[in-house]
Amino acid sequence: MASSSQRQNETEDDENDISSTRSRSGQSVSSWDEKLQRSQSMSSRASNYEPITDAERAEITRVASESKPPEQHGESHDPALDPSDPAFDIYKWARMTLREAEGANIKHRRASITFKNLSVSGSGIAMNLQPTVASYLLAPLRIGELVRFAKKPQRKILAGFDGVVKPGEMLLVLGRPGSGCSTLLKTLAGELHGLKVGDDSVIHYSGIPQDQMIKHFKGEIVYNAEVDIHFPHLTVRQTLEFAAAMRTPRNRILGESRQENVKRATAVVMAVCGLTHVQNTKVGNAYVRGASGGERKRVSIAEMLLSFSPIGCWDNSTRGLDASSALTFVRTLRLSADLIGSAHAVAAYQASQAMYDAFDKVVVLYEGREIYFGPTILARDYFTEMGWHCPARQTTPDFLTSISNVNERKTRTGYEEKVPRTAVEFEQYWRNSSLYRSLQEEMKTHEEEDYTSAAADEFKAARRAVQAHHVPPSSPYTVSTPMQIQICTKRGFQRLWNERDIRFTLVIGQASMALIIGSIFYGTINDTNSFFAKSSVIFSAVLLNALIAVTEINRLYDQRPIVEKQASYAFYHPFTEALATVVADLPVQLLTAVVFNVVLYFLSGLRREAAQFFIFFLFAFLTRMAMMGLFRTIGAATKTVTQALAIAAVFVLAIVIYTGFTIPRPNMHPWFKWLSWCNPVAFAFEALLVNEFHGRQFPCGNFVPAYPNLVGDTFICSVPGAIVGQSTVSGDTYLEKSYRYSYSHTWRNLGIVIAFLIFFMITYLGVSEINSKPDGKGEVLLFRRGHVPHYIEEGLRHENSEDPEASLAITGRHDTQAEDIRAIPPQKAIFTWHNVNYDIPVKDGTRRLLDQVSGWVKPGTLTALMGVSGAGKTTLLDVLAQRTSIGVVTGDMLVNGKPLDPSFQRKTGYVQQQDLHLETSTVREALRFSAMVRQPKSVSKKEKYEYVEEVIKMINAEDFAEAVVGVPGEGLNVEQRKLLTIGVELAAKPALLFFLDEPTSGLDSQSSWSILSFLRKLADHGQAVLSTIHQPSALLFQEFDRLLFLTTGGRTVYFGEIGTNSQTLTSYFERHGARPCSDSENVAEYMLEVVNPEANAKDNRDWVETWRSSEENKNILAELDRINQETSKIPVEDDTGTSLSQYAVPIYTQTYYTTIRAFQQYWRTPGYILHKFGLGVASSLFIGFSFWQSNSSQQGLQNVLLSVFMLTTIFTALIQQIIPRFVIQRSLYEVRERPSRAYSYVAFLLANIIVEIPYQILLGIMVYASYYYSVFGIQSSERQGLVLLFCVQFFVYASTFSQMVIAALPDAETAGIIATLMFAMCVLFNGVLQPPDALPGFWTFMYRVSPFTYIIDGIVATALHSRKVVCSENEMSIFSPPPNMTCGQYLAPYLQLAPGTLYNPAATSNCEYCALSVADQYLGPRGISWGQRWRNFGLVWAYVAFDLFMIPLLYYTFRMKKWHGQVGTSKRRRGLNTVYAWIRTFGRSCRTVLVGRWEKLPLEKRAENPRMY
């Protein structure tokens, strides 16, 4: 019950609410605001402009042309007009430019937005079920459900919106996440992918309907998404100059050239957005180092500003910006609206009062409904008159957003039963209000004035004036198609140059591969024994030239979001970017082709004649380009990279098998033979093979019989195409007999390859232009089947009611109660730090990030850590939490006056800014896992689970406790993820304190309030909380007890109490010379303004020295000493050893729970499992049917060998699937769970190894069944069983090999490249393409090192042992014996040593001799032996064991210690140290297990042998 005085205060506040003034942003109006006020009428009256002076015109021209440095202009140089000068004045620049444009009769495009009864629906439902492997397998049993989901029911997102935004006006869009803010902006901007506008909805732009606007004027309405996507290797200037070039108008001021206009516009926008200092820095992304996150956000803003669109829709574009940058952005839009009449709609979370005051209108959304649309100055009073209370220091946007939160809004006294409660009631109240009637009248008046043919014609004429010549008037683009191609190509070459290190690595990699392949065939003698080797090297050459293009798919998907964004800005046709990419890529492809093919051609001993070399290169290069067109088409035609790679894998398999080498065209089965005629590589292979063999006579390498002095027709060379009695074999005849190839097809094949190239390129360009974006999806929750809350199922039954409320994501339905918080045991220890310094190594020495920082955190207090941008807030938090990996930390950090022990990290909770969770876990499972591995083993499982239920209540997660985490958009929303992040740390029951890094980042104001209120309650019940926070509102800031404020260089400006209404804090700064802080001012913003030197340039006060010499600092240091002295006397409660260990539970417990979680993850990722099995089974079936029931001829034996060879190529596709799964688990472990000491890396690695094995075993069985019986038929049980064992072993080895490679490497892409290279080495040296006896001596070791040698040997020997060989007619050696001798008599001496069979010994002519009698004779020269099958089986297990040993060793060496050898230390010593460190860690793990067993022993057993363990 509130006291009477409290009620009286509330009543007074309510009265003040109604009569309060609009301005709450500060003491006085800034010079910027004065300029904005002066500019209000400039856009409408040209007469207000004074003529531009010659000096001003010269300065603008100089800046545009950059022909002279400023100092050469003497007095004529005006720094206010120079974007590169710190004194640059955007207002003055805009005024001068606008005058010149008016003088040149250049009209600015102005347009309004009017929408009536706007309703929007999206596909899908508000809730989905988590798919599992079982749900996919049982899908045929749920046909009705599948049909229902296939219909994609429409879900109402927005209902009945009305509004108008006139030229020169700015609209602020406010609402909680999920209320429809983004959908509203997308709809207004025409970004309707996945959205459907209601049939009776009306959207007009100055009288132009939306469908016509999208078709003809798409670039005039642009949408800036929340995500920042750019080419990471381009610099900031290059990125923005491209945008400016694509929107350069035809008519320009001062007679500028296009290039001058581009430079001028880019320089101005960079100056306005604060990007001048990083103009030559790469934009970067999460993987490429470049501009910071805030700077990337400003690049996105600048890029859209350069589109010069009259209508802009900005979706949370201030996210990631500090308050100053966000306000500058809004004021820039304000200036644009005032000067040239542009209209802007901006959605902003946590908007400050100063930002709010810059807008003309505001729309408030509540569960997809419009509850206010009107002037910003009336919004606050509208809701207070409705009956809602606005606290004194709450900003207007925070108050408006809080109206839609039942837990945060408060009614005024006496209005409890009068105010609306639901979204529908709010909407009805709004529609019955006088402001709504005023809005309708305004819309009607605007339509009468603006919806005229003259207004539309004026807009179209202004639009036509900016379009380049030869651009059709109906085109939405500013520059012509050839110009688009030119600009995109220029950018392509810029990307190429900026990525030169990557491209150079590619060239080196190709050269290395050429060296390896060429050296394998080096020194091959040009006789008939080299025929297979020459075929192999040409096959390898054409294949590697073709398949290098597969990497284009990943590149294409990397740039696709960027192309889609810029196409939506009407910068260019998507096909022009596709064509430009091909053109810009030509030099690299040509260079790579030259290096690869020259090295390979001459090293492998191919025909050294100029004509043949250039023909070889021509076909190789054209094949490379044709296949790039094919794989780019696949990438452009698909929706996801996984889908594209799966399709590409099928194409690759078909290309390899049906090139003509693995199965010659005469031996192909009819059901797949047509593939060879659709394969451009097959035509290139034929041309290259005949190019090598045409017109050559090859000396015979093996005569039949091999007698001396043979004459007449008594001998023949034992290769197809040989002529009896001749000692040489014609290359053309050999190819005709073996492959049915002819030299006459060479130029025909060239034409076919070129036709394929043209066809694929045209298809690629066409698909790039027409392939639409993937359908947009609203936010939905995922639940496990059978665990959907009852009330959600009830809500889904009304899905067709078209009520937007039914589509909303779920948030907590009640507030956290005090009794929920009491479940957490209060903390008792005090954490202190004194003179903490942190230095990191840099190029020129060291850099200090923290400088003499001191402070403490006591139980029951909530301490804020704030500072200017780059002050080191997160760095200090990481240092205090012991989470730094580089640099040197000095100073004292104590708990109860004692140094930190090894258990400190697991006894603290650290809530990171990134909400990282395993996407397949439910909320309850994530909390239980944290409790099981992070709470001590002395706590029973039942107690841990009960505590988890208490945590669920604390974080208000009962409604979504069974919801799956998922991914953004399909899973938990932003607020729910943040609550889960906090809950995971609470579930660990930290004994010391709570660290939180930006817990309100990315949240709206009300979600931020919910989080901070929860932290306040934690602190009130004995928790010690230290949290960084970025620009909190006044109400949020008041929740904290103490403040530690840092400035640049990690130096302290203030540490101490905040005080009631922040009086203690503000009085300190005011006493030391800062301006007074008004009662209505946000103290956090006041602090940043006072301390920030950029914002307060006139004040040269050194606040760091002021603090260090202040009495407050002296008192703090004295109190710090007192705390340490008093608490150091407190005895340690538990020092038995277990409480001081790094981990709370033993290694076997860690392994058990991490393995269970890994199995859950795999089971709930059916896409990965089904792709794995689908790829394996489909590939094996395809291989099996391609080599169906291979016969017993020599070609049949070769087909069997090559079929096993092709089966092993599945290996590379498998590792490309396994590696990313490992990376997902590892990212979560290394970023969140390892620093928290949740479990050891040994448990993590074991879990990931174990979880793959059952699936790999099952996959091996299925592949065996699909492949073995197709190729070999039914054989003995022993053979079938052994081949099965080899297949299972092969897939187990694939998983361990993949994990060994990724264990040490930073990302999946790098690991995939390294793994593919290692696979290629193994495949090249396994004895199939080149028998071991033919390998150069240097490479013989690789044949023995390759694990594929033993896998292929084992399978082939088992399947072919003792098989009788029956030569085909083409393989038979036919010759005649001397007169008066039978074939048997003539060949008797030869047959005593030769392995073959004579089919007609009694004949006196046409002796038919087959070179082989049993398959073992074919396998022997290749080192394949039946007797070594079990040895091979054992050796492969040795490789598996080697992988298992290397996985933890590599992970520890490169990921745990990140070890770098010191200068001067020998390699041998460094290697020994690394191995020793790993062994020592292994010993610690063993000790942990043994200690666990010791503690379980009864006391009497311990007494018998106290040193047994």
Image (cartoon, rainbow, N blue to C red):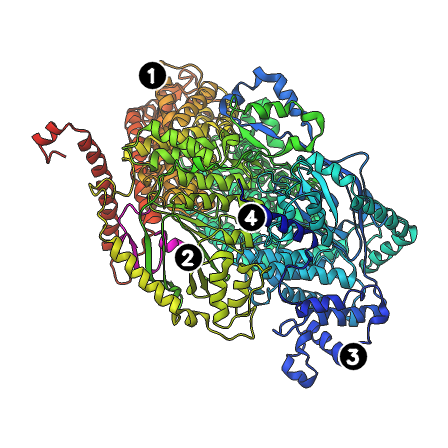
Work out how far the residue at label 1 is from the one at label 2, CA to CA, in angstroms: 64 Å
912 relative to 1501, above or below: below
Whichever of labels 3 and 2 marks the residue nearer the N terminus, that label is 3
- Report the front residue among 928 and 550: 928
Q: Are marks 4 and 1 in contact (CB under 8 Å)?
A: no
1367 relative to 300, above or below: above
Residue at the spot of label 3: 53
> Is 896 colored magenta in this rendering?
yes
Q: Which mark is residue 875?
A: 2
Q: Is residue 630 left or right of residue 877?
A: right
Q: Secondary structure at mark 1?
A: helix
Q: Secondary structure at mark 2?
A: helix
Mark 4 or 3, which is nearer the eye?
A: 4
Tell me which residue sits at (37%, 22%) in the image.
1283
Circle 3: residue type: Thr
Q: Is residue 848 left or right of residue 106?
A: left
Tell me which residue sits at (83%, 71%) in the image.
48
Residue at the spot of label 1: 1278
Chain part drawn in magenta: 876-905
Q: Which mark is residue 5?
A: 4
